[in-house]
Amino acid sequence: METWVVITVAAAFLQNIRSTLQKYLKSHIGTTGATFVRFGYGLPFAFGFLAILHYGLGYSLPAFHWTFAGWIVLAALAQIFAQALLIHLFSYRNFAVGTAYSRTEPAQAALFGLIFLSETVPWVVLMAIAISVAGVMLISVARTELNRTALVSSLASRTVAIGLCAGTFFGIAAVGYRGASLSLGGPNFLMQGGVTLCAAITFQTIVMLVFIALREPGEFRRIAAAWKPALAVGFVGASASFGWFTAMTLEKAAVVKAVAQIEMLFTFASTVFIFKERINRLEVAGCLAIVAGILLLLVF
């Protein structure tokens, strides 16, 4: 199995843990605070990874340049916008439909990879991406009261537009991070991913600090009080991001994000085996589609 596949699966597993921890924190410190800890508390761990690579393993630091900075700003802002749109979706009654359409990120990443990096994706890979995306969308709406034609009949709704926009920004972010990492030109994929992570998380932390200071200054006290679980979120989140960035240095963002859909299987397994929830036919069909898409992707 190729290195990027192993890294991607590990990153997806860690991201599932991070999401679970953030949901716990959200009930204690609010949405803004739970979002910030992913960046602010992940910052020291990101630089810790970089220090290990540089001082422990002796890898040299790549030269910084404006092209790299431009990619970082583009990707980091796109990721923040995407997260904000996803959070906004929860204020709508039929948010599940919008969330399902936000999962079109891999397909949109393929388009932006072509536009920004001139990277083409074979039709077989596009088919695999489409199958896995369809599986994720099925799982996203499987526990709602929507009928089978909901995803099509609701195309004109605001939630679908917001979901697609979120997927667009996530796709731009993925391609932007790959562009940033590749622009460094070396010394290896680990160092390129580590430097990209540190630059991105530093910028995002600064943006979040300014936002909280201007809009919700009282949130700082709650964030500080929840430092123990926040440290766990920071560590797991930084580890997952390090995995994403190194994987996307080795392989196209669209392909990495398609394999990353396996995160839904981890989430699904948690609900079944830990929370003992029953499964329905749509969820089973969605899981099978995700597995089929990923297997097709890895074979070709």
Image (cartoon, helix red, strand yellow):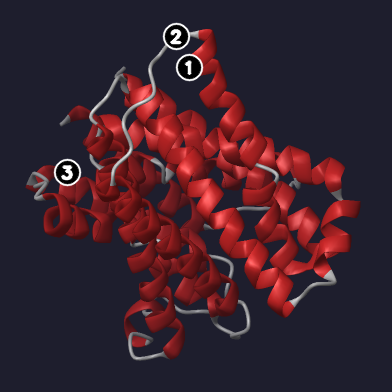
- Check disc 1 and report the residue beneath it: 54
Q: Is residue 298 left or right of residue 86?
A: left
Within 10 Å of disc 3 (Cα), the crowding (few <14, some 14-19, many 20+) is many
Identify whether 137 is placed above or below 188. below
Q: Which mark is residue 125?
A: 3
Identify whether 219 is placed above or below 94. above
- Check disc 2 and report the residue beneath it: 58
Nearer to me, 195 or 259: 195
Name the spot of residue 201 as percent of width and height, x first: 53, 47
User: Which three-letter amino acid code belongs to the residue tagged 3?
Assistant: Val
Q: Are marks 1 and 2 in contact (CB under 8 Å)?
A: yes
Identify whether 154 is placed above or below 182. below
Q: Are marks 2 and 3 in contact (CB under 8 Å)?
A: no
The CA span between labels 2 and 3 is 37 Å
Name the spot of residue 65 as percent of width and height, x first: 29, 43
- Helix, strand or loop at mark 2: loop
Within 10 Å of disc 2 (Cα), the crowding (few <14, some 14-19, many 20+) is few
The residue under the point 35% across, 39% down is 259
User: Which three-letter amino acid code belongs to the residue tagged 2?
Assistant: Gly
Name the spot of residue 157 as percent of width and height, x first: 40, 90
